Image: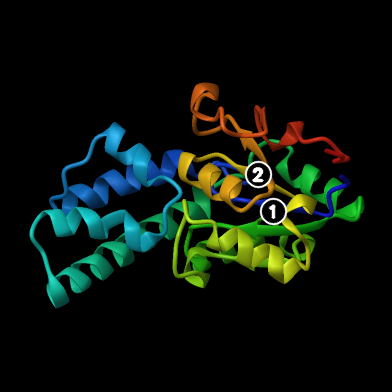
């Protein structure tokens, strides 16, 4: 089956942002007195913003309006810190832009489907001058259910006008990988965030997106 579309997750796939996210997330967890360790943190990678803090705040006993207010404060604090850092320190993975341009020239429909917030997605595509190569750009703010729910990928495929069996999804996180697989698309995992043994459910595993083939026929 010849593929028509390629959907990219953003953090950990196009931009080398996961190390920055980890530092900032742990800082905000500490500020809001939320216990966190590497094992727990691995569970939230790839989830929507609302799912990053809310479950932990609930476990601490916060409810109702107090919970919602604290959750929003944590989200806004996280966004502010990341945008301040990303403007100077965020970088694309090596040869990522070249690969995106190559695939665009080949005629594939390209999209970004990220759990990150829209402001960050816009910063990335504008800072690195790659917006024009993507037909669809969806953020975590565009869906009700975040990854591992496949909603964002199903919505992206519908907008692109392609079927799951015509689509390749590129992911790095455990949550994102499950979402990609549950969407029915062919999933390629990159080893930028997790080791191979945690990516075994992917259809194919590569080091990073510079290793993507120029032609897809699976």
Query: Which of the colour schemes (rainbow, by chain, secondary structure, one colour) is used?
Result: rainbow
The numbered disc on residue 53 is none
Compared to residue 185, the image places residue 197 above or below, namely above
Question: Along the line of sight, which residue is nearer the eye, 8 or 159?
Answer: 159
State which tag comes first along the sequence, 1 or 2: 1
- Picture coordinates of residue 102, whole percent (x, y): 86, 46
- Picture coordinates of residue 66, whole percent (x, y): 13, 73
Residue beneath disc 2: 170
Which residue is at 57% across, 49% downward? 182
The numbered disc on residue 7 is 1
Residue 172 position by quadrant: top right
Horizontal relation, residue 97 to residue 137: left or right:
right
Which residue is at 27% across, 44% downward? 26
Question: Along the line of sight, which residue is nearer the eye, 32 or 200?
Answer: 200
Question: Along the line of sight, which residue is nearer the eye, 37 or 183?
Answer: 183
Whether pointer 1 and pointer 2 mark residues with C-beta atoms closer than 8 Å, the reply is yes
* Quadrant assignment for the C terminus: top right
- Picture coordinates of residue 12, whole percent (x, y): 55, 42
């Amino acid at each position: 089956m010849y593929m028509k579309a390629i959907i990219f997750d953003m953090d950990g796939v196009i931009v080398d942002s996961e190390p920055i996210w980890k530092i900032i997330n742990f800082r905000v967890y500490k500020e809001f007195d939320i216990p966190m360790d590497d094992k727990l943190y691995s569970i939230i990678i790839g989830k929507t913003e609302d799912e990053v803090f809310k479950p932990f705040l609930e476990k601490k006993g916060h409810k109702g309006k107090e919970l919602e207010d604290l959750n929003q404060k944590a989200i806004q604090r996280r966004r502010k810190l990341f945008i301040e850092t990303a403007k100077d320190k965020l970088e694309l993975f090596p040869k990522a832009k070249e690969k995106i341009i190559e695939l665009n020239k080949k005629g594939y429909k390209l999209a970004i489907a990220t759990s990150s917030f829209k402001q960050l997605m816009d910063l990335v595509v504008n800072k690195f001058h790659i917006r024009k190569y993507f037909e669809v750009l969806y953020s975590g703010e565009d869906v009700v259910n975040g990854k591992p729910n496949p909603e964002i990928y199903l919505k992206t495929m519908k907008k692109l006008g392609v079927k799951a069996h015509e689509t390749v999804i590129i992911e790095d996180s455990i949550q994102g990988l499950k979402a990609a697989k549950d969407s029915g698309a062919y999933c390629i995992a990159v080893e930028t965030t997790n080791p191979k043994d945690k990516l075994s459910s992917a259809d194919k595993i590569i080091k990073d997106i510079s290793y993507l083939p120029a032609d897809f026929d699976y």
